[in-house]
Image: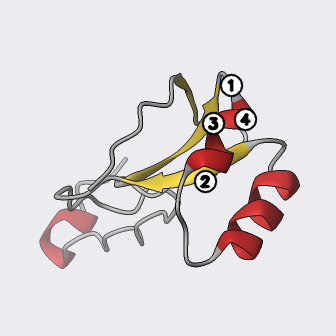
Amino acid sequence: MKYSLIKGSMHVVGYSPDGDSMMFKAANPALWDGLENDNKDTFTEKLTKENGAVQLCLEGIDALETHFAPMPLPTPPDLKSKEK
C-alpha cells in the first residue's frame, strides 16, 4: 500500500462538519492527482465545488453530530412551581 503525505489546513468556519469529519484544504492541490481513487470524477467535482477543500472522515472516531441542536428538555412538573 502506498502512503502519501498531503500537508494543508483544516476548515470549520462556514461548514457544518460532523464530529468525526472536517474540511481539509491541501497546501499543494497538485498532490491530489497522485492519489488512486475509484471515484476520481466525483472527487474532482466536489474538490472544485468546495474551492479545493475535501471532507475527511476520521477513522476510529465516533463523535456526536455537531450541526443538530438537541430538543429542549421539558421542566419536570414538581419544579414548575419553583420557576421564576
Q: Disc 3 versus disc 2: distance between alpha carbons?
A: 26 Å
Res 27 quadrant in image: top right
- In contact (CB < 8 Å): disc 4 and disc 2: no
Q: Nearer the viewer, mark 4 or mark 2?
A: 4
Between discs 3 and 2, the one toward the N terminus: 2
From the top left corner, tell me how far across and down residue 26 is, in percent. 63, 31
Residue wearing tag 3: 31
Front in this rendered view, residue 53 or 62 = 53
- In contact (CB < 8 Å): disc 4 and disc 1: yes
Residue wearing tag 4: 30
Residue wearing tag 1: 28
From the top left corner, tell me how far across and down residue 69 is, in percent. 48, 63
Q: Disc 4 versus disc 2: distance between alpha carbons?
A: 26 Å
Q: Residues within 10 Å of mark 3 (few under 14, many from 20)?
A: few
When the figure is inspected, residue 16 is found, relative to residue 13, above or below; the finding is below
Residue drawn at 34 percent across, 55 percent down: 20
Disc 4 marks which amino acid?
A: Ala
Describe the element under mark 4 as helix, strand or loop. Answer: helix
Disc 2 marks which amino acid?
A: Ser
Residue drawn at 84 percent across, 43 percent down: 51
